[in-house]
Amino acid sequence: MTMMMTMQMMLVMQVMVTTIKIVVMIVMMMMMMMMMMMMMMMMMMMMMMMMIIMIMMMMMMMMMMVMMMMMMMMMMMMMMMMMMMMMMMMMMMIMMMMMMMMMMMMIMMMMIMMMMKVMMMMMMPLKKYFVYKIRS
């Protein structure tokens, strides 16, 4: 009787142990699965973050490029404007010079005319005198 009881107990114990083992295995598997899932999720998140950062970087680069282009354009425009201004200034200078020259010429002409007149005035009496002399 006792022998039978012990045998039964042993059997029950064995079954329990096996069941516990199985349960533990299942739990372990579940845990592992959870861990794996978590890891995967983390990886996915990291990847997403990386992607976002990459995209942001690309956008920044593009913006920088555009800004640079704009700056270059502005610089070019400024340069062109400066050149134009310089040209205009040069033209103005030349024009001024020409005007000055013209004025000088005019003054010179006037002076010469005046001189001529004065000379004529000076000569007039002599001429008259000479004419009278010859007549007489």
Image (cartoon, rainbow, N blue to C red):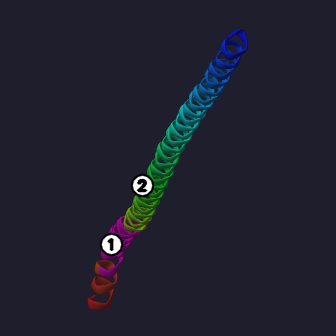
Magenta span: predominant SS is helix
Front in this rendered view, residue 83 or 120: 83
Q: Magenta span covers which residues? A: 98-127
**Place of residue 4 in the rendered image (x, y in percent of width and height, measured from the top left):** 68, 16
In this rendering, is residue 111 above or below 37? below
Identify the amino acid type marked 2: Met
Q: Which residue is denoted by mark 2 in the rendering?
A: 70
Mark 1 vs mark 2, foreground winner is 2
Q: Which residue is denoted by mark 1 in the rendering?
A: 113
Image quadrant occupied by the C terminus: bottom left
**Place of residue 73 in the rendered image (x, y in percent of width and height, measured from the top left):** 43, 59
- Whether residue 78 sits left or right of residue 21 in the image: it is left
Image quadrant occupied by the N terminus: top right
Identify the amino acid type marked 1: Met
**Place of residue 51 in the rendered image (x, y in percent of width and height, measured from the top left):** 50, 47
Tell me which corner region of the image, top left, top right, bottom left or bottom right, holds residue 127.
Answer: bottom left
